[in-house]
Image (tube, helix red, strand yellow):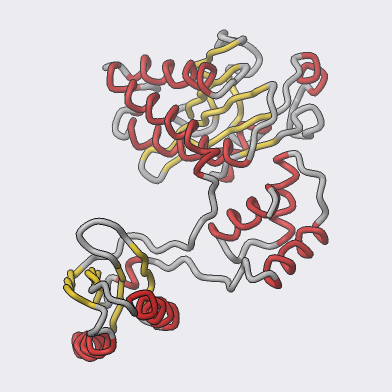
Amino acid sequence: MDEIDRILLAQLGKNSRKSSYEITRYLHDLGYKITDRTVRHRLVRLEKNNIVLGYTVLLNPTLLSEKLNRTILLKFKFRADTSDMISRLEKYCGESHFCIYSARMTGDFDWICHFVFDSVEQYEFESSNFLNRFVDLIDDFRSYESGMVKVSPYALFDDHELRDQKWRVYKILNSLKKYQKLNEKLQFIVESLVRHFDAKFARIWLLDREKETLVLKFSAGKYKNIDGEFSKVPADSNKIGKIVMTGKPSITNDVVNDKRIRHPQWAKKEKLQSFAGYPLTHGRKIIGVLAMFSTKRLQAADFEILGVFSDQISRELEGLFEAID
């Protein structure tokens, strides 16, 4: 698998109904010159090579909360045929319609499963059958009632690539605690994007009370002035306003040729290559935009971690945004 394959899998891991056309547009934003046909051919190849075994659904946890959820912990007996019995357990969990998660683990227990049943009777029957089937493997067994809060498919990320970025995010979020005033926190955020994410400049716009205009409140990097051309941006226009209108991030690795950029010659002069903009939320409402420009080409992992960063910023500042008009 190459980098593009990993991006395809990560996108399908978030939403398996995402079309090849949507994925192609996302790849274009990242700077990859690839056609919709090529994306479809890549997906077929991933299926033929058994990398993609099937497509799953992201379920609403409230639906599962009406069912009986059980988390099962197993401790194994270790004998000559233990590896064969573990293989049987893997096959059983893989084929079981009520087992939605299973994994090998270290520590006091060796295996964890999450089962979802329609009734207590089904739980008693299936758990009894389960224990009898693997009686020669199981040394200890624990069953806990659990409440499902999230069910999502596997998302492919390269931990090695993300390790440094995650550490930077942790440092920024942890440092926010040093500041008591909201203005200081938000200014620190844009300065951190410049310092830790190689941004040429970073900015935060906040919606005015009428929800019609984005007002530039904080800026760091080469452009620190908040009274320039983009000090006020209509919420229904240009690249920044579109983030508010759609509620979705806006990214590109081809700033100069992006039609949403108002001054491409300026971008060329500044040697800008990438842009990343994300909505800031308060509750379920979008209240602003966090954005940055960089002279470097950002990888898919960079855009992902910046999205996580903006989400965490919204959570960290929950309840404080009312302090700014």
On the image, which quarter does residue 129 sit in? bottom left
> Residue placed at 37% from the left, 16% from the top?
183
Decide which of 252, 305 is in the foreground and name it.
305
101 sits left or right of 45 in the view: left
Decide which of 267, 306 is in the foreground and name it.
306
Q: Is residue 204 above or below residue 71?
A: above
On the image, which quarter does residue 8 sit in? bottom right
Q: Is residue 215 above or below residue 97?
A: above
> Residue placed at 77% from the left, 21% from the top?
263
100 sits left or right of 121 in the view: right
What is the count of numbered marks? 0
Decide which of 187, 178 is in the foreground and name it.
178
> Residue placed at 76% from the left, 20% from the top?
267
Q: Position of residue 73 (x, y in %)?
A: 23, 68
Quadrant of the drawing holding the N terminus: bottom right
On the image, which quarter does residue 325 sit in? top left
Q: Position of residue 275 (x, y in %)?
A: 65, 30
Q: Position of residue 192 (x, y in %)?
A: 47, 19
Q: Which residue is situated farthest in the front direction here?
A: 80
Q: Position of residue 197 (x, y in %)?
A: 55, 24
> Residue placed at 27% from the left, 84% from the top?
134
